[in-house]
């Protein structure tokens, strides 16, 4: 074997990092942080552990990158909903977006932000903490948007914006859990519609 041939064998195989990250996202989404083994991840990504560490860092760092991709992609409905002109339209877009995102036929059912941290042990604490922060940020953004609606006269002056944001988030995550349990998109849309009929909640 020539030196050139040895160099080719020893050279790391090139791969599409973005595509690999999308595949890792699907594994985390389906199996959660704890349930996704390194073998699961590298197998889906089509790379070795060495290449994974070199490109993305350890499992926790990979998960954080996957969560960013999830936020910018499947979960982008959350940020888009905040741009709606009224608080009720924001809540409607947020819940409708949840239904759509958690029941995509080409993706795992449910929400990465919910099942990603289920049954997470001590080793997965950083990932669980990242998801808690992720969920809390979403709630705070909703609360800020609802406060804007109060200031603009779109919501009653005595509206408890924190409670209203928690209500929408609770319904949203409940929808995600039900989606992961196999409830159909149509049935979940009825849940979202029902939750919004008494807007704003008493």
Image (cartoon, rainbow, N blue to C red):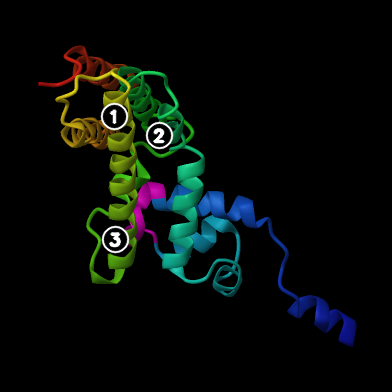
Let me know if residue 1 appears in the view.
no
Q: Is residue 50 left or right of residue 110?
A: right
Name which of mark 2 and mark 1 comes first in the sequence: 2
Q: In the image, which residues are magenta? A: 29-36
In the depicted view, which residue is nearer to us: 3 or 18?
A: 18
Q: Which mark is residue 129?
A: 3
Percent from the top left, x then y, of residue 81? 41, 27
Percent from the top left, x then y, of residue 31? 35, 52
In the depicted view, which residue is nearer to us: 57 or 157?
A: 157
Q: Is residue 154 magenta?
A: no
- Give how far apart the Cα atoms at labels 3 and 1 are: 26 Å
Q: With respect to residue 107, does 38 lie above or below?
A: below
- Give how far apart the Cα atoms at labels 2 and 1 are: 14 Å
Q: Which residue is mark 2?
A: 78
- Give how far apart the Cα atoms at labels 2 and 3 are: 20 Å
In the depicted view, which residue is nearer to us: 13 or 61?
A: 61
Let me know if residue 115 appears in the view.
yes
Q: Is residue 108 left or right of residue 8?
A: left
Q: Report the mark closest to the observer, 2 or 1.
A: 1
Q: Which mark is residue 146?
A: 1
Q: Quadrant of residue 17?
A: bottom right
Q: With respect to residue 177, does 199 lie above or below?
A: above
Name which of mark 3 and mark 1 comes first in the sequence: 3
């Amino acid at each position: 074997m020539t030196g050139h041939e040895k160099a080719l064998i020893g050279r790391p195989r090139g791969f599409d990092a973005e595509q690999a990250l999308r595949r890792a996202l699907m594994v985390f989404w389906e199996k959660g942080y704890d349930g996704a083994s390194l073998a699961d991840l590298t197998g889906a990504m089509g790379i070795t552990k060495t290449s994974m560490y070199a490109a993305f860092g350890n499992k926790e760092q990979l998960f954080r990158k996957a969560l960013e991709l999830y936020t910018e992609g499947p979960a982008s409905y959350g940020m888009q909903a905040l741009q709606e002109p009224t608080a009720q339209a924001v809540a409607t877009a947020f819940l409708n977006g949840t239904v759509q995102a958690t029941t995509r036929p080409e993706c795992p059912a449910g929400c990465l932000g919910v099942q990603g941290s289920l049954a997470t042990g001590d080793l997965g604490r950083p990932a669980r903490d990242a998801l808690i922060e992720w969920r809390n940020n979403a709630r705070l953004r909703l609360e800020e948007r609802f406060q804007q609606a109060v200031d603009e006269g779109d919501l009653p002056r005595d509206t408890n914006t924190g409670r209203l944001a928690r209500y929408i988030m609770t319904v949203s995550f409940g929808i995600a859990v039900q989606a992961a349990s196999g409830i159909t998109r149509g049935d979940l849309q009825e849940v979202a519609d029902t939750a919004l009929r008494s807007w704003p909640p008493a």
